[in-house]
Image: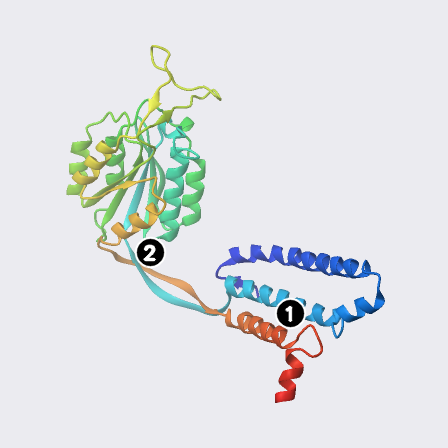
């Protein structure tokens, strides 16, 4: 049976175990060499009286094994109890990605577009029961992924999205709102959310009319602002070159939060700052307020935590280390005498 871990990232800490063992071995060899330099056998005998290398080996070995058990407990091995059928409910979400070249600006790292992709990915991965689709827009809007529950397909679509594949003369957000509204099924009872990810620059269309029509169709319009108020240069297709104005000055693209806030307000939605670390959680919190509908039934694995076994073993090893002193007259002998 394949081992399943609730927090596999903790397993990377196991690489430190051989290092600790090596440090301890180096220390033991250093102590032995230091004692040998004393020269006097009687002095060495007095210093090492009742001390056992095997006892120290057992004590340190127990400590290292206890640490190993602790790391495994943190990783939390799990046992499958089988699958159960659960009802799922959610809403329909369409992400509208601004693919104008200004989204390649690196005033946020690695770029505005990369941050936008990561926000969408995090939101999709954390959503439960929702369906999602993706469209891209620059001077026009283009469908990229139909509404689905396929997370892998969404991640692949995000990876492949590139401004070079679309016309990039500006950002017509109204075309994205119109297309997004059309992609929702008006017959379905669940609420619909259109989430626009953009830097807010150079919007050409009459977005007010598009937003009003979306609201009339039962669509909530949310916006996420990418970039900074200070801005950054816009890369050209030539590596290392940036867009310049008619006077030869490098064009600095700045986030326009104002228009994005206005779109969200008119669309009964909310504006989010894409630079915030937990923006995906904030988005999901707002989406949870919308009306959900039953999406169907899916099978879900039931898991049982097994961390208590390595944790218990680790505690026993620490207890054994405490009872097993370095000298023969240490804690264990005293405990046996008083028992």
**Position of the N terminus by quadrant:** bottom right
Q: Quadrant of residue 270?
A: top left
Tag of residue 187: none
101 or 325, which is in the foreground? 325
Q: Along the horizontal axis of the image, is 272 left or right of 48? A: left
Please name the residue that numbered disc 2 is placed on: 129
Whether residue 149 is situated above or below residue 298 in the rendered picture: above
> Which quadrant of the figure has residue 27?
bottom right
Residue found at x 45% / y 36%: 160
- Residue name at image x 67 percent, y 82 percent: 333
Q: Is residue 267 above or below residue 319?
A: above
How far across and down, in percent of the image, does residue 59 sit? 66, 70
**Observer-nearest residue: 184 or 331?**
331
The colour style of the image is: rainbow
**At numbered mark 2, what does the secondary structure look like: helix, strand or loop?**
loop
Q: Nearer the viewer, residue 213 or 35?
A: 35
Which numbered disc covers residue 62? 1
**Does residue 113 appear in this view?**
yes
Q: Position of residue 120 (x, y in %)?
A: 36, 43
- Label 2: how many Cα within 10 Å (few below 14, some 14–19, many 20+): many
Q: Residue at (76%, 73%) from the top-left corner? A: 49
Residue 66 is situated, as x and y percent measured from the top left of the image, at 59, 68
**In front: label 2 or label 1:** 1
Is 332 or 9 nearer to us in this picture?
332
Question: Dot 1 lies on which element?
Answer: helix
């Amino acid at each position: 049976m394949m081992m399943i871990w609730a927090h596999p990232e903790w397993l990377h800490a196991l690489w430190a175990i051989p290092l600790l063992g090596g440090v301890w071995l180096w220390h033991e060899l250093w102590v032995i060499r230091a004692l040998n330099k004393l020269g006097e056998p009687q002095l060495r005998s007095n210093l090492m009286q009742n001390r056992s290398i095997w006892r120290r080996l057992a004590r340190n070995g127990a400590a290292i094994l206890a640490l190993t058990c602790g790391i495994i407990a943190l990783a939390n091995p799990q046992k499958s109890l089988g699958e159960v059928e659960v009802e799922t409910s959610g809403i329909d979400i369409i992400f509208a990605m601004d693919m104008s070249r200004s989204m390649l600006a690196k005033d946020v790292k690695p770029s505005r577009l990369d941050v936008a992709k990561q926000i969408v990915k995090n939101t999709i991965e954390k959503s439960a029961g929702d369906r999602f689709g993706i469209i891209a827009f620059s001077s026009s809007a283009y469908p990229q992924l139909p509404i689905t529950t396929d997370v892998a397909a969404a991640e692949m679509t995000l990876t492949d999205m590139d401004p070079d594949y679309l016309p990039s003369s500006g950002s017509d957000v109204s075309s994205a709102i119109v297309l997004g509204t059309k992609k929702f099924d008006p017959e379905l009872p669940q609420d619909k959310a259109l989430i626009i990810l953009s830097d807010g620059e150079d919007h050409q269309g009459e977005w007010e009319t598009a937003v009003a029509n979306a609201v009339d169709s039962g669509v909530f319009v949310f916006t996420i602002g990418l970039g900074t108020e200070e801005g950054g240069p816009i890369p050209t297709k030539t590596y290392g070159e940036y867009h310049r104005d008619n006077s030869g000055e490098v064009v600095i693209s700045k986030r326009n939060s104002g228009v994005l806030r206005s779109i969200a307000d008119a669309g009964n939605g909310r504006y989010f700052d894409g630079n915030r670390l937990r923006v995906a959680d904030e988005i999901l919190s707002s989406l949870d307020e919308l009306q959900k509908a039953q999406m169907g039934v899916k099978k879900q694995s039931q898991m049982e935590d097994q961390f208590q076994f390595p944790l218990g073993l680790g505690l026993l090893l620490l207890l054994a280390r405490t009872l097993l002193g370095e000298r023969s007259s240490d804690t264990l002998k005293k405990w046996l005498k008083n028992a």
